[in-house]
Image (cartoon, helix red, strand yellow):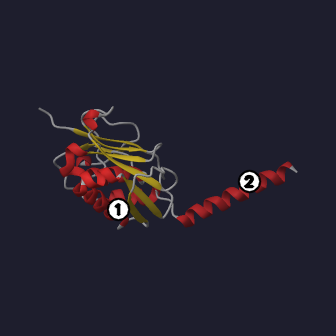
């Protein structure tokens, strides 16, 4: 029997463009899954060691879901409208990370993976894999956290230099954001001047 757990992410490059993030975890989830919450926080800390951002994890039942706020839900994905093999999901449009409670011993690597999507990374794949459009083809892809499935080779993986480098390229710093705003203002001003 083939063992595959899939990690799904709806991602976009440069999903996060701010230096500080707020994650909200429901009070009930925090009380029911304290170890899993600690594993998620450890994954956020691992990413923050490599990318220039600060974060705050709030235990709250307020569902703000705007701007820099990302909700983290611990769910039994086999009971949801998900594929039964799915163990994690980053929903960019709703700004929610879903983590499967049935895989509580894997919350740390699953969180690393889903946070990779938050920071703009797509899935990694081997050339011989059936991979989705937008996957990054790398040798030994199944040893990276951004491989699209949990495998014995990536369950204990940490964030690799390649993943850090790619995330840094898609991660927009506040300085870059200001430059983009200034460029857009100049371009818009030029358009207004040419209409006169």
Q: At x 50% / y 61%, what residue is drawn? A: 18
User: Is 171 positioned to the left or the right of 97 in the image?
Assistant: right
**Residue 78 x, y percent position in the rendering:** 25, 34
Q: At x 46% / y 46%, what residue is drawn? A: 12
Q: Which numbered disc covers residue 47?
A: 1
Mark 1 or mark 2, whichever is nearer to me = 1
Q: Is residue 26 above or below residue 182?
A: above
Instruction: Inspect this view and state whether residue 160 appears.
Output: no
Q: In the depicted view, which residue is nearer to us: 129 or 52? A: 52
Q: At x 16% / y 37%, what residue is drawn? A: 3
**Residue 4 x, y percent position in the rendering:** 20, 38
Q: How many circles with numbers are drawn on the protein?
A: 2
Residue bearing mark 2: 188
For the N terminus, the image quarter is top left
Q: Are marks 1 and 2 in contact (CB under 8 Å)?
A: no
Residue at the right extreme of this rendering: 196
Tell me the CA gap for discs 1 and 2: 36 Å
Helix or strand or loop: what does disc 2 sit on?
A: helix
Q: Is residue 9 above or below residue 35?
A: above
Q: Earlier in the sequence, mark 1 or mark 2?
A: 1
**Residue 112 x, y percent position in the rendering:** 30, 54
Q: Which quadrant of the figure has residue 49?
A: bottom left
């Amino acid at each position: 029997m083939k063992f595959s757990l899939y990690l799904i992410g709806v991602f976009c490059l440069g999903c996060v463009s701010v230096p500080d993030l707020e994650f909200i975890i429901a009070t009930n989830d925090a009380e029911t899954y304290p170890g899993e919450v600690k594993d998620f926080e450890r994954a956020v800390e691992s990413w923050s060691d490599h990318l220039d951002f600060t974060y705050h994890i709030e235990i709250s039942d307020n569902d703000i879901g705007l701007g820099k706020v990302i909700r983290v839900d611990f769910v039994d994905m086999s009971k949801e409208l998900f594929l039964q093999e799915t163990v994690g999901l980053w929903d960019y449009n709703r700004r929610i990370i879903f983590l499967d409670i049935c895989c509580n011993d894997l919350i740390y690597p699953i969180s690393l993976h889903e946070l990779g999507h938050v920071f703009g990374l797509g899935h990694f794949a081997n050339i011989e894999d059936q991979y989705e459009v937008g996957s990054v083809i790398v040798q030994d892809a199944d040893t990276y956290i951004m491989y699209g499935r949990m495998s014995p080779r990536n369950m204990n993986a940490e964030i690799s230099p390649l993943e850090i480098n790619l995330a840094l390229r898609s991660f927009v710093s506040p300085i870059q954001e200001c430059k983009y705003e200034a460029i857009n203002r100049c371009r818009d001003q030029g358009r207004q001047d040419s209409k006169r």
